[in-house]
Amino acid sequence: MLPPESEIGRVNARAGASAVPVSPETYAVLSSGLDAGTRFAGCFDVTIGPLVALWRSARASLAPPDAAGIERALPLVDYRDLLLDSRKGTAALRHPGQSVDLGGIGKGLAGDSIREVLRRCGVGSAYSNLGGNVVTLGAKPDGSPWQIGIQHPREERGLVGAVAVVDEAVVTSGDYQRYFTDRNGRRHHHILDPTTGYPAASGLVSVTIVAGDSLVADVLSTALFVAGMEKGLEHLGRFPGAGAVFVDAGLRVYVTEGLRSRFRPAEGVRFAALN
Amino acid sequence: MIGWIIGGVVVVALGIAGGVGWSALRREHKEARNLPLNAVDFGRLRDGTYHGAYAGGMYKWRANACQVTVSGGRVTGIELVGSDDPGGENTQHHALYDRVIEAQSLPVDTISGATLTSKAYLQAVENALVQAQGD
């Protein structure tokens, strides 16, 4: 939950009323969010706040939101209603009740910022791990690539495998990270489909993205999780140098061609390469 | 005037105390961060039971001890045999130990999609395993 005094909190509080001046950093992340909305139409929306709020209270009460509530929230989710004015450095939301939520982009941006600070301080070799969002700077001190494990989506103590990376980010979106089980025993995870208003049901349980920037990796992992593998691969094709590891509901593992030689499966895990 | 001098002295003293405290905390944190299991060559472990302890950083906050069993050249069991961690009642070290056992074939630096913090538990494991390494 955003503190109301935060910049984004103020933008949300003034939704439908007025534009709010924001810092260049906030402006940049909102602008990236807007851009992601255009690129991944229907699969990523930075104005998903009203739905996130609905599902957050659902998790607290262990009961999914009623359909009417979702119907009311859906029209409020539209990134095109986030109005940025680069000249004035302001952000605004067109309609009352709309709100920005930086899930799927905020941690990514933070990871890139950390790497930038380290780089400016002359650090040549480092990694940061913000709650599972990994960003590496350079190679390991001994010159070899970092080995980044990928959490197994169903075995708490297991890995799907590991990818070797240098100066890249590795971000995973999975249905196992935050979820609740309702009274009927149905599981609801936290990655929402901005088109349906419900947790994404694209047939994937985990998407890992390897990319140069952690912001890109963060947005891609969320958007591809929502889009599903087929559509996701189309999106991924527009990001040269980015690779993905998908795990589907049958726990089958798929690795994109560019990552194949850098991916090592965990013991007992079999995978298929994607072209 | 004298009030200003006293005030100045207090500010300087607080500054020094804060600086000392901060650097001490930083050292403790730095120690905790730099505890990967990279001193162990998992390909050269001799069978046996080994004990390892970690003093827990400068302030002993993370002191713990463990017993590691190696059989057939592989780590087959790790047990916590002592901990000063007030939070040591919880069971997070089990997950960590299991990860060590699993990671023998796939050593990783960190994990995407998961949070993993308690490196202090790993230090005692490493200390035990260093003894298990063949020469």
Image (cartoon, rainbow, N blue to C red):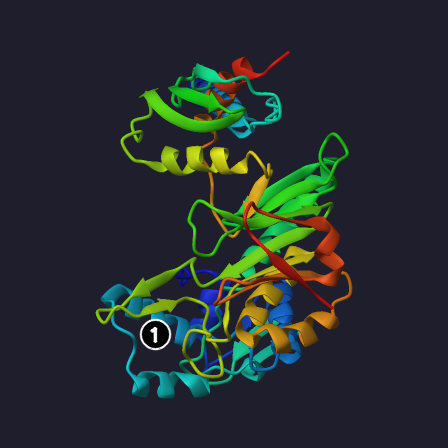
Q: Position of residue B60 (x, y in %)?
A: 40, 17
Q: Quadrant of the C terminus of chain A?
A: bottom right
Dot 1: element: helix
**In the rendered image, which residue does mark 1 sit on?**
A54
B109 lies left or right of B75: right
- Mark 1 crowd level (few <14, some 14–19, many ≥20, 10 Å Cα): some
- Viewer-proximal residue among B23 and A252: A252
Q: Outermost residue, front direction?
A: B72
| Residue A25 visible to the viewer | no
- Viewer-proximal residue among A150 and B55: A150
Q: Position of residue A167 (x, y in %)?
A: 73, 47
Please state which amino acid type lies under the numbered disc 1: Leu
A106 versus B104 height, above or below: below
A92 versus B125 height, above or below: below
Q: Quadrant of the N terminus of chain A?
A: bottom left
Residue B98: quarter of image: top left
Q: Chain of mark 1?
A: A
A238 lies left or right of B25: right
**Residue at 42 percent of width and 83 percent of height:** A96
- Viewer-proximal residue among B33 and B18: B33
| Residue A131 visible to the viewer | yes
Q: Position of residue A47 (x, y in %)?
A: 50, 76
A191 lies left or right of A215: left
**Residue at 77 percent of width and 34 percent of height:** A143
Residue A76: quarter of image: bottom left
**Residue at 63 percent of width and 73 percent of height:** A232
